Image (cartoon, rainbow, N blue to C red):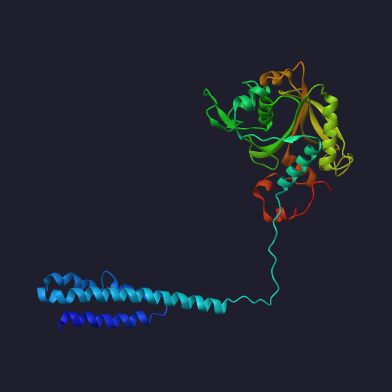
Amino acid sequence: MSSVVSELEAIRDEAAAAIGSAADPGALEEARVRYLGRKARLVQIGRTMKDLPIEEKRLVGPALTAIRAGLEDLVRARGVELEREAEAELLATDRVDLTLPGRRPRRGAPHPLVEVVRSLEDVFVGLGYEIAEGPEVETEWNNFEALNIPADHPTRTDMDSFYVVDPLAARSALLRTHTSPVQIRTMETRQPPIYVVAPGRAYRRDETDATHSPVFHQIEALAVDEGLSMADLTGTLDAFAQGAFGSGTRIRLVPTFFPFTEPSAQLEVSCHLCGGAGCSQCASGWLEIGGAGMVDPAVFEAVGIDPERYTGFAFGMGIERVAMIRYGITDIRLFLESPQQFLDQFRGLPLVR
């Protein structure tokens, strides 16, 4: 028998013993590298075969191939055995005790802003309004021009708006600064009567602090029909305030200016903490929550609605503002950061108490 073949058989027996006695995957890998790795004696013998006589090559070649294949099979088989042993040990040590009482999974809850949006939507739907939605990336036409906001208005500069296309380009686009573009899209595609409410996100270049955020939520309502007046607007706002803030809530309209409504007013509600007497939250007994007014005829002309035949009113507010008033929250950043301790306070808490 060739001396090289004898050496191969000795290596085979030694490697088989090491592989079979490997107690864990680490030891098995160490044995594999020692006997089958690039520096293993089997590899060195294979490299020297070219120097052997032809008769010995005919003996060494098949023996080397068979021994290598056999050792590789042993490594795979021992690996499977070790995996099964580990699984059996895990099952034995980590067995579930069925006699222990079960642990009920903790139930989640909607974010407080989601709860407020749903509550406000319920109020508007109860008044006969439809829910309308629109894209958050808008054209300047829908976001500004159709709303009677001129080109030199400060909000149209990139200091206040997030432009996704250069504002000096022929067709610019931006993240909507309010949800009013949904009203424009609705009036461009539908004929009166129109009664819609549009909740959603809006974006402005505001520095983040306790009362401002570059991303926030709004809800706006639009009514267009024949013969609508400020009396209809006031009655709708009164019904909304009762549903959103509780029975007994009073409203008042303070004259102001908005480019897209005429006349325009700030909507204020009586403080739910002091009932209008004045406290640390409201100071005067009233809390400002949004804007309202009759739709400017110029807006109707921009969307192709006859201002001589139809009138309309619109009003909107920040959803975070409503939630902060309702729950006495003083920092808007809590809605975005949403720490668990903050969210746990609203589990099962209704909007109107």
| Residue sitting nearer the eye, 64 or 120 | 64
The residue positioned 26% from the left and 76% from the top of the image is: 67
Please state the horizontal and vertical placement of residue 195, each as a whole percent of the image.
Answer: 76, 30
Q: Above or below — where is 179 with respect to 80? A: above
Please state the horizontal and vertical placement of residue 70, each as a whole percent of the image.
Answer: 29, 76
Q: Which of the 4 image quarters holds residue 132? A: top right
- Position of 316 with respect to 36 (left or right) is right
Please state the horizontal and vertical placement of residue 297, each as a whole percent of the image.
Answer: 73, 18
Q: Which of the 4 image quarters holds residue 202? A: top right
Q: Above or below — where is 61 with respect to 257? A: below
The residue positioned 53% from the left and 76% from the top of the image is: 90
Q: Above or below — where is 46 with respect to 18? A: above
| Residue sitting nearer the eye, 77 or 280 | 77
Image quarter where the N terminus lies is bottom left
Count of all numbered marks drawn on residues in the image: 0
| Residue sitting nearer the eye, 198 or 246 | 198
Q: Above or below — where is 119 with respect to 288? A: below
Question: Can you name the residue that lies furthest to the top here?
Answer: 308
The residue positioned 82% from the left and 21% from the top of the image is: 227
Please state the horizontal and vertical placement of residue 120, each as a whole percent of the image.
Answer: 77, 40
- Position of 208 with respect to 20 (left or right) is right
| Residue sitting nearer the eye, 211 or 127 | 127
- Position of 337 with respect to 347 (left or right) is left
Q: Which of the 4 image quarters holds residue 99? A: bottom right
